[in-house]
Image (tube, helix red, strand yellow):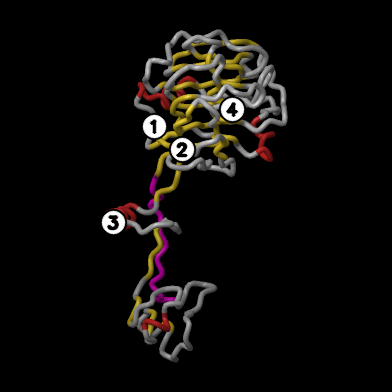
Amino acid sequence: IAIWDRALSAAEVADLTSGGIPVPVQVVPGLIAYWPFDGNLYDAIGDNHGEAMGTDDIGYTGGQFGEGIALDGIDQFVQTPVENEEMFDFQDGTGFSISAWFTVDSFTKSWQALIAKGEGNRWRVHRRGGENVFTANGGNADVSQGTTDVSDGGVHHIVLVSDPDGGEVRFYVDGELEGTSGAPAIQSNDNPMMIGENPDARNRTWHGMIDDVGIWDRPITEEEIALIYNDGGGTALLSAEATGKSITWDFNDGLPEGSEVAGTAEHSEDEGVDDSGALVLTRNVASQTGGWLSPEIGTVSSFTIDF
């Protein structure tokens, strides 16, 4: 069963009728948080919904997929719930991964932060000092700086992988490994995770677009990174897929278990399942709108829910 907060178009209804209700499928399993930034700051798979910070409202612009947030580089950033901050400390020793698409409108501050939990042995993805390249930290020290000039006006993709079992941190730009460091050891803190700012070193706000930020509680593989990057075309981290399942009640054996005919008016004796194996509704439309099956007068021979 699905509920929308808007009227569906005729084409959308036809798609649902033929294909069923789409359900989100993780392209790369293990996501613990995902912000598509398509007109809002919601976490699409959990409750880590972002809060817009800054003097002016955060705007939206064309992203890698749909929309992305457009940060002004002055004081705008997205803050995740402080009550959930521990889940981004990654203290269980299994590692983590971060993926994001972005543009650079301008580099105006050293170490401008794309996404961060803090300084020192906490993790972050940011500009390398005053240069036009990126670096990252997944525990201990920054990985060696990247080589890709990310300030060329194009859309770029980064992945940070912290892999304790493999004994290293890996940093990818546009699908290519650009830096590593050894022996990741993440320290916890009480900071909320921020997108477009560093909670431990403030005033490093991002100036540009950020889109499709995903976080996993495991090291993702090079094959999975290649799938996400997809030769620059990208693959959104959630894919809508119809289940192809449905339930149909034909009323041949009575009403579905635990259900009854309901309405706003008293029902006449001939309402219910008749000898033909159909549900007969005889009250007027106004009184039957509270019915769980149909507001129509007449016979309902079957009722199907696709999901």
Instruction: Give the Cα distance between marks 2 and 4.
Output: 23 Å
Kindly state the secondary structure of the residue where label 2 is placed.
loop
Q: Contact, CB < 8 Å: mark 2 with mark 1?
A: yes
- Residue on which disc 3 sits: 14
What amino acid is at disc 2?
Phe
In the image, farthest residue toward the front: 55
What amino acid is at disc 3?
Ala
134 in magenta: no
Kindly state the secondary structure of the residue where label 1 is placed.
loop
Q: Mark 1, mark 3: which one is toward the viewer? A: 1
- Residue on which disc 1 sits: 63
**The image quarter in which residue 233 lies:** top left
Q: Mark 3, mark 2: which one is toward the viewer? A: 2
246 in magenta: yes
Kindly state the secondary structure of the residue where label 3 is placed.
helix
Instruction: Give the Cα distance between marks 1 and 3.
Output: 28 Å
**Label 4 crowd bin: few (<14), some (14–19), many (20+), radius 10 Å:** many
- Residue on which disc 4 sits: 218
Image height of 262 relative to 98, above or below: below
The mark that comes first in sequence, 1 or 3, is 3
The mark that comes first in sequence, 2 or 1, is 2
Q: Contact, CB < 8 Å: mark 2 with mark 4?
A: no
Question: In the figure, is residue 92 to the left or right of 240?
Answer: right
Q: Which mark is residue 29?
A: none
First to last magenta residue range: 241-253
What amino acid is at disc 1?
Gly
The mark that comes first in sequence, 2 or 4, is 2
Q: Residue at x 44, y 58 (%)?
A: 3
**Label 1 crowd bin: few (<14), some (14–19), many (20+), radius 10 Å:** many
The mark that comes first in sequence, 3 or 4, is 3
Q: Contact, CB < 8 Å: mark 1 with mark 4?
A: no
